[in-house]
Amino acid sequence: MDARRSRRGLPLLVLAAVTALIVGMDQLTKHWVMATLPEGRWWSPLPGSAWQFFRITHTTNTGAAFGIFPEQGGVFILIAVVVVVAIVLYYRHLPEGDWLIRISLGLQLGGALGNLIDRLRFGHVVDFIDVGFWPIFNIADASISIGVVLIAYSLWRGDRGRARQGSNLADEEVRS
């Protein structure tokens, strides 16, 4: 009985661990940027002209990821709360063994909470990862994006597996 109970608790532990890791990294890096760089200033750890490809730029964002829909902070607080609740409720009903989906939901939950903390504390989100050709973003934004890509991959992989399974069943029927 204890082994079954501990196995059932493992998925929630995974969600909590991934979420805590992302929120922790997100908040620590944002704290470092705010303590080190005045807003609007940048620094690059790369030598020479490589700064054009990667730098740390302290900026704020009152909109959604990558600066879209500026000045809509209240709307995004509400959306973040709904997303957090939806992820937690959905997570509890996932079938056992779907670890990629579980990890991706942890990434998304951690990202949503990281940016929600900023919105509640500052009224905006702190962004700092600047790769030059893309809008400036943060760990939370990257985590949400990676989580979405992993879910898409998992769904694609699942569809391919079901199609392969259906093809194998059709082959067996032809042989019999």
Image (tube, rainbow, N blue to C red):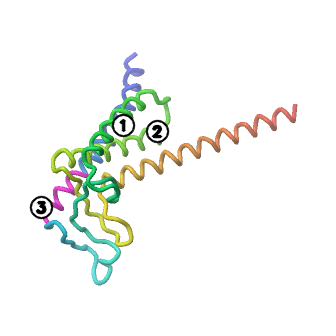
Specify start and end residues of the magenta stretch as a single range: 26-36
- Residue 99: mark: 2
| Residue 23 percent across, percent down from the top left | 26, 46
In the rendered structure, which amino acid carries the disc numbered 1?
A: Val
Q: Which residue is mark 1?
A: 14
Q: Which of the 4 image quarters holds residue 47?
A: bottom left
Of callouts 3 and 2, which one flags the residue occurring earlier in the amino acid sequence?
A: 3
- The secondary element bearing badge 3 is classed as helix
| Residue 105 percent across, percent down from the top left | 40, 41
| Residue 132 percent across, percent down from the top left | 35, 72
Of callouts 1 and 2, which one flags the residue occurring earlier in the amino acid sequence?
A: 1
- The secondary element bearing badge 1 is classed as helix
> Camera-side residue: 90 or 20?
90
Q: Quadrant of the C terminus?
A: top right
| Residue 60 percent across, percent down from the top left | 22, 60
User: Dot 2 surroundings within 10 Å: few (below 14), some, or many (20 or more)?
Assistant: some
Label 1 or label 3, whichever lies nearer to me, is 3
